[in-house]
Amino acid sequence: MGKSSKDKRDAYYRLAKEEGWRARSAYKLLQMDEEFNLFEGVTRVVDLCAAPGSWSQVLSRILIKGEKFGRAAWEDKQEKTRRYVLGEKANDNKPSATEEKDLLNPRQDVKIVAIDLQPMSPLEGITMLRADITHPSTIPLLLQALDPETFDPSATSASHPVDLVLSDGAPDVTGLHDLDIYVQSQLLWAALNLALCVLKPGGKFVAKIFRGKDVDLLYAQLKLVFDRVRVAKPRSSRASSIEAFIVCEGFCPPKGFKASLDNPLGAGATLPPGNETGSERTKPSRKLREDGITELELGSEDEEVGEDIRWIAPFLACGDLSAYDADASYHLPKDRQILDPIQPPTAPPYKRALEMRKAAGGAYGKTKGL
C-alpha cells in the first residue's frame, strides 16, 4: 500500500509523522494518560515490546524533557492566556527566561528501560534491551539494567522497584481470532510475570489485550494482584479492532506472595485429592483415563449453586470525542506533502521477502521480463 493511500486512510498515521512521533500508537498512551493520569509521581518505568519506540518516546519527552501534551498542555496555555489578560505578564509579548524554563518540567532521577526482540534506534535517556520477555533469562537482564550498581545475580526482584510497567506488544495476527486471542494472552502472561518482579506496592500496569469471549476471566485474575482494574479504548484505536488496554492500578500482591521465575503466579500447582465416594464427590479431583486423558472433577453437579461472583471490569473510552476518528477516511488538500516515517522499521518481518524480491529483479510490483 502506497504512502498516499495510507495517508488518506489513517489520520493518526499522518498526524504522528507531522508531530514527530515514531508511530501512531503514541496517541493511545497519551489519551490513556489524560483519562487515568498514568504519569503522576512516576520516575521509574519499564516499557515492554517497545519497538519501534513510540511509547518510549512519549516517556522520554514527558518524564525526561518535561514536555506536556493533550489536556495538560491546553490547560497551561489557558492559564498563560489568563495571566496575560489580567496583566500579570510583562508588557512585552516575549516570555522571560524564567517563563521559558517553566514551560518544561523535567523530573529528577528518571530511569526508563525498554525491551523488545527487534532492534530500536536510540532515544535520549532510555536504556534499551534486545531480549525476549517470554524467556526467564530476560528478568536478570532487566534487573541489571534498572540498578547496575546494586545488581544481585541471585535476586528475583528489583532492589528499587518501578512505578509503572507498560506493554504494547501483540503477536503477528493470523486473522483467526481465537488463536490470536490465545497467543496474545500468553504474551500478556509473560509481561505480567515480569511486572510482578519489578513493580513496587501501589504501582501501575498497562498492557494491550484482545477482547474475546472469556476476557472477564483475565480481569478477575488481574484483580487478585491489583486494587483497580479497568479497560480502556483510546480514540486512536480503531473501533473495528478487538484491541483494548487493561489499566491496573494499586499493585497489592497477596500476603506472603513472592515473585518466582520457576513458578510464576503459582503456575503448575496441582489440585488437592478429592473424595472418590460415588456421588458424594465434592472436592476437586483428577483422574487419568486409560487413553491418557486427564479428567478434572471440580465438584458435584447436584451441588447448590452459590451467588454469582463474576466480576466485570469497567470499560472506558479515552480521548476527546471531537478528535479524529481512527476508522474514518479524511480528504487531504491537493497541495499536501507526503511525509516519510519518523523512524522506519529497523528489522521488519517482511525484510527478507523484500530482499528476495529485489534479487529476483522485481520491485514495486514490477517483475523481470515484463
Image: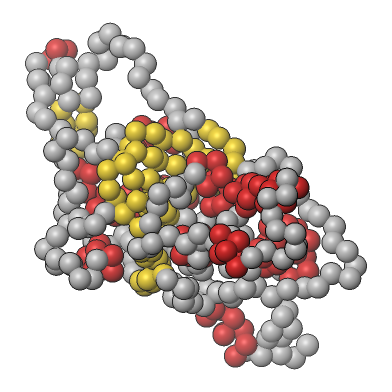
**Is 240 on the left or on the right of 67, as rendered?**
right
Inspect this view and state whether residue 275 appears.
yes
The image quadrant that residue 262 belongs to is bottom left
Q: Residue at x 78, y 88 (%)?
A: 370
Residue 114 placement: quadrant: bottom left
Measured from the top left, where is residue 70 in percent x and y? 63, 51
Percent of width and height locating residue 109? 35, 63
Residue 344: % across, % down: 59, 75
The answer to whether 128 appears left or right of 338 in the picture is left
**Residue at x 59% of width, y 38% of height:** 317
In-image side of 48 versus 288 (left or right): right
156 or 305, which lies in front?
A: 156
Question: Is 248 on the left or on the right of 344, as rendered?
Answer: left
Residue 10 visible in the shown view: no
Q: What is the x, y in percent for residue 111?
A: 36, 64
Residue located at (73% from left, 45% from top):
86
